[in-house]
Image (cartoon, helix red, strand yellow):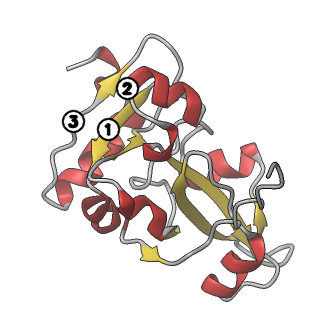
Amino acid sequence: MPETADHPAVARVVEAAARKGVRLDIHSFAESTHTATEAAAAVGTDVQRIVKSLVFVAGSEGEEPRTYVCLVAGPDRVDLARLAVVVGEPDIRRATAREARDLTGFVIGGIPPLGHAHHVRVVMDPALDRHEVVWAAAGLPNVVFPVPPATLRALANATVAPIVEDPAPDTAS
């Protein structure tokens, strides 16, 4: 197993999956898999099969933030209005890098769909179901694992809902 598999962040992800009866196939790379494009190049797949774990927060100043992790395909962007409706949080916003790290226990680029430091609610876009296998971060910005979308959904205890922006219309024609 790669040396990074012993890293506490990766171990937390592996252990969280093991508690649900799933053994992850961890892949570690010398190069970064921080972005969806880098991850796709490293594993030899297209960016549609890369899972981005994006962190959002809601809550008033002074109260404990409610944390949401959105699982979307590599090129997709979360539509805040759709997410707000799905989670019932009209004032939801993207977490800062520091908030994301503090609330999940992982740095951006390595945030996995499970094993978070604090309770998070996970929402998964159904576009990920188009593929037999997708690739998700495993706790570090150079460590990933392949997983069928149905298994990903179960591991993350995710709600499935359309949360991404509609593609821009093709105006070239």
Mark 2 or mark 3: whose residue is earlier in sequence: 3
Residue of label 1 = 145
Mark 1 or mark 2: whose residue is earlier in sequence: 2
Q: Which mark is residue 94?
A: none
Quadrant of the frame with the N terminus? top left
Residue of label 2 = 43
Task: Locate residue 23 relative to residue 149 in the image: left or right.
Answer: left
Q: What is the distance, in whole Å, between disc 3 and disc 1 at their CAs?
A: 6 Å
Please name whichever residue, 150 or 118, is drawn nearer the observer in this view of the structure.
Answer: 150
Say whether marks 1 and 2 touch (CB < 8 Å).
no
Give how far across and how far down residue 169 sits, in percent.
77, 61
Between label 1 and label 2, give the one nearer the viewer: 2
Say whether marks 3 and 1 touch (CB < 8 Å).
yes
Residue of label 3 = 25
Task: Report crowding for label 3: few under 14, some 14 to 19, many 20 or more residues within 10 A (C-alpha).
Answer: few
Task: Locate residue 141 relative to residue 171 in the image: left or right.
Answer: left
In the image, what residue type sits under mark 1?
Phe
Say whether marks 2 and 3 touch (CB < 8 Å).
no
Q: Is residue 115 above or below residue 107?
A: below
Q: What is the distance, in whole Å, between disc 2 and disc 3 at their CAs?
A: 13 Å
In the image, what residue type sits under mark 3?
Asp
Does dot 1 land on a helix, a strand or a loop? Answer: strand
In the image, what residue type sits under mark 2?
Val
Give how far across and how far down residue 82 sits, in percent.
69, 79
Does dot 2 land on a helix, a strand or a loop? Answer: helix
The residue depicted at 68 percent of the width and 56 percent of the height is: 77
Q: What is the distance, in whole Å, between disc 1 and disc 2 at their CAs?
A: 10 Å
